[in-house]
Image: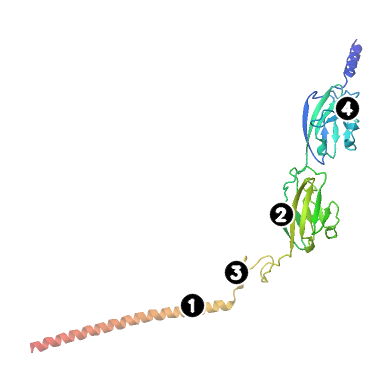
Amino acid sequence: MRDHLYLFFFMIHFSTGCILTDVHQTTVITAYTGGSVLLPCSCADPQSTADTFTWEFNRYREGWWIQVFEDEKFSGRRELFNEDSPNNLSLLISDIREEDQGNYMCKTKQHTFIQLIVKGCNLVQNRESLTVVTGYSGESVVLPCSCTELQAKPEQIRWVYYLVNTNEEIYPKERSERHKNRVELLNQTTPGNLSLHISALTADHGGDYACSVSSQQVSYRLQVKEKPHIQTVCLSTHQPSHQTQELTPPRPSQHTPQYVFIILGVILSVLLLALLAFIYWRCRGGRNVKKETMMMKNSTENKTIRMRCCILL
């Protein structure tokens, strides 16, 4: 009896087939041009499999659905995950393009919807005016250009060098000998960084440059100047080579000549003698004044006595 019951449940399990998760719900996913995106779809029961299923695509404002695995625009960019995991019906799309934006449907006996939003490259500075950049001969310079979304890689990027009567493409193909093996993009880690690095500058590299993405463009005028000469300051043998006289003035105890101290000693001795002479002069002058005052006082008293004697006589 128990064996019959197990067989009954086993037949019910496989007769129901794949029941999708998130049935009749819409999942919103954001992707960036040039990258990859995984559109999830799977059976709720990990032991179940789908006999048949399809992925369909519908653009916004279009009334019909197309088969993803029958459309040439997805050729070489689509991949399923159900070979190792039959219950996993997820779809991987690589090299995302703006035209991939739209609605996707994973369809078995049931269906689930995914809305894919694709963000492309819009230049940070999209303008016609020139931005002046200065570089120096023998050095390197970076001409900035980037997408507002640094994770978005443009489908096509061009750097052009403009001459008087014509122009030369310098990226992605170096058609100019003056820029050969001297230019590269700085987008190793961020696909949206399209800045151009020019090395070993010469006067011939001066001119107008433009970064173009679709119909957007950023322009620069590169001025190449001679590197200014920097005057160096001769340093004392007692000072480290990385220090200047302004930053580390010499200490008097280490660098002042001995004759300076001799002169200072002579001056101090003269000043001390002059001070002693002045003090002696003041003291002697005071005694002379006192002596003269006494003599004048005695003379006055003598005159007074004489006058009194004359009167008595």
Residue density around tag 1, few if under 14, some if 14–19, many if 20 or more, within 10 Å? few
> Which percent across, then down, holds residue 229?
71, 67
Image quarter in which the N terminus is found = top right
Residue designated by label 3: 251
Marks 1 and 4, the one that precedes in the sequence: 4
Q: Which mark is residue 268?
A: 1
Tag 3: residue type? Arg
Q: Which image quadrant for residue 252?
A: bottom right
Marks 4 and 2, the one that precedes in the sequence: 4
Q: CA distance from mark 4 to mark 2?
A: 52 Å
Q: CA distance from mark 2 to mark 3?
A: 51 Å
Q: CA distance from mark 1 to mark 2?
A: 69 Å
Q: Is residue 231 above or below residue 114?
A: below
Residue 91 makes an appearance in the image: yes
Per the image, label 4 sits on a secondary structure element best described as: strand
Q: Is residue 282 above or below residue 5?
A: below
Residue density around tag 2, few if under 14, some if 14–19, many if 20 or more, within 10 Å? some
> Which percent across, then down, holds residue 284?
34, 82
Q: Nearer the viewer, residue 9 or 239?
A: 9
Marks 4 and 3, the one that precedes in the sequence: 4
Residue designated by label 2: 131
> Which percent across, then down, holds residue 308?
12, 86
Q: Is residue 106 above or below residue 218?
A: above
Tag 2: residue type? Thr
Marks 1 and 2, the one that precedes in the sequence: 2
Q: Residue furthest top?
A: 1
Q: Nearer the viewer, mark 1 or mark 2?
A: 2
Residue designated by label 4: 54
Per the image, label 2 sits on a secondary structure element best described as: strand
Q: Nearer the viewer, mark 4 or mark 2?
A: 2
